[in-house]
Amino acid sequence: MHAPITVKRFNPEATNQDSSHYSVDYHRGGTVLSALLKIKAEIDGTLTFRASCRAAICGSCPMQINGTAKLACKTSLQEELDRHGRIDLAPMPNMAVIKDLVVEMTPFWQKVKAVTPYIVSLPNEPVPTASLKNIHQELHHADNCIMCGACLSACATHEVSPRFLGPAALAKAYRFMVDPRDQHHTKRLETLQDADGIWDCVRCNFCVSVCPKEVAPMDQIVRLRRLSIQAGLDQTVEARHITQFLKIVGQEGRLNEARLPIQMLWGDWKKLFRMIPLGIKMLIRGKVPSLLNRHEGYQKVQRIFNQRGK
């Protein structure tokens, strides 16, 4: 059987960039990486890509395969051909390309380094170990990350804001936030409130869909947000969106679209003033609920929230 493979090429020393087309013999159990190794050894020795363990452990071989970031060593040639009828390979998006399928990973590692990716203990303080028994349940697979960078390349926020810490780094931050041996929890959460931290995630879910190890980075970011609010770090606009949303629904039995921005932005008069034109449009179009005519089932919703608070 022959697999048609197209590779998007990039050579910083060449003026003309183009794609290369190959036809590779393969067996049903073959992977994209095995095909690339065959091309490298038998057809085109100039083709450049990263690979190491061939077992989805090292995270060296992520690339775009038919438009989606995947590990080449874990991706079946046959399944891709059955689904797409072809194999189109390109470097991971939103990352600087060094050559062919190799991208610059330095910015990725800088983001991971920024979240202090190791246990921090305080001088003369005992390290708690009593809670280690259930730590794997608390981690929610955050420790499965192999640092391949696929989630960052797919991240919608990183695409428009390269300073965003990114899914992998934030999932790594969560991993240490729930480790009982770490004594840096408060400082970690405070750092993550800054611009480009946990509140910049737009929950596009792309990081979850491309992660080869089921880390679910977006879910870990949501958990970090919950931990922040529980720790009293709830004065950012984004945190107040959550707390005031719940407060309004609990009081009125539904979301009041007029109250929410007011309570979110209360005290920031400049931003509130900018909301006036939007408020007028909402009023004209009937998007402002009346306090006199509450939602029919609001008392049932109130009981749910009252029970939740006990």
Image (cartoon, rainbow, N blue to C red):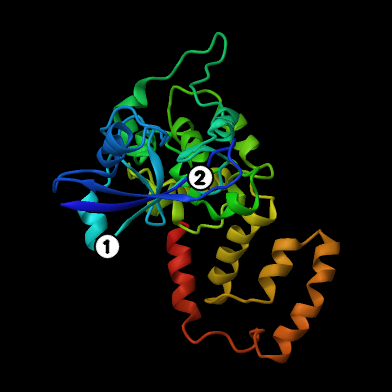
> Is residue 221 among the parts visible in the rendering?
no
Label 1 neighbour load within 10 Å: few <14, some 14-19, many 20+:
few
Residue matched to label 1: 85
Q: How many marks?
A: 2
Q: Quadrant of the C terminus?
A: bottom left
Q: Residue at x 52, y 40 (%)?
A: 170
Spatial distance from mark 1 to mark 2, Cα to Cα?
27 Å
Amino acid at the residue labelled 1: Gly
Residue 58, image quadrant: top left
Foreground of the two, 13 or 133: 13
Q: Which mark is residue 34?
A: none
Q: Residue at x 77, y 62 (%)?
A: 266
Q: Residue at x 50, y 50 (%)?
A: 18
**From the viewer's perspective, is residue 235 above or below residue 294?**
above
Percent position (x, y) of residue 37? 29, 35
Q: Earlier in the sequence, mark 1 or mark 2?
A: 1
Residue matched to label 2: 152
Q: Is residue 187 left or right of residue 7?
A: right
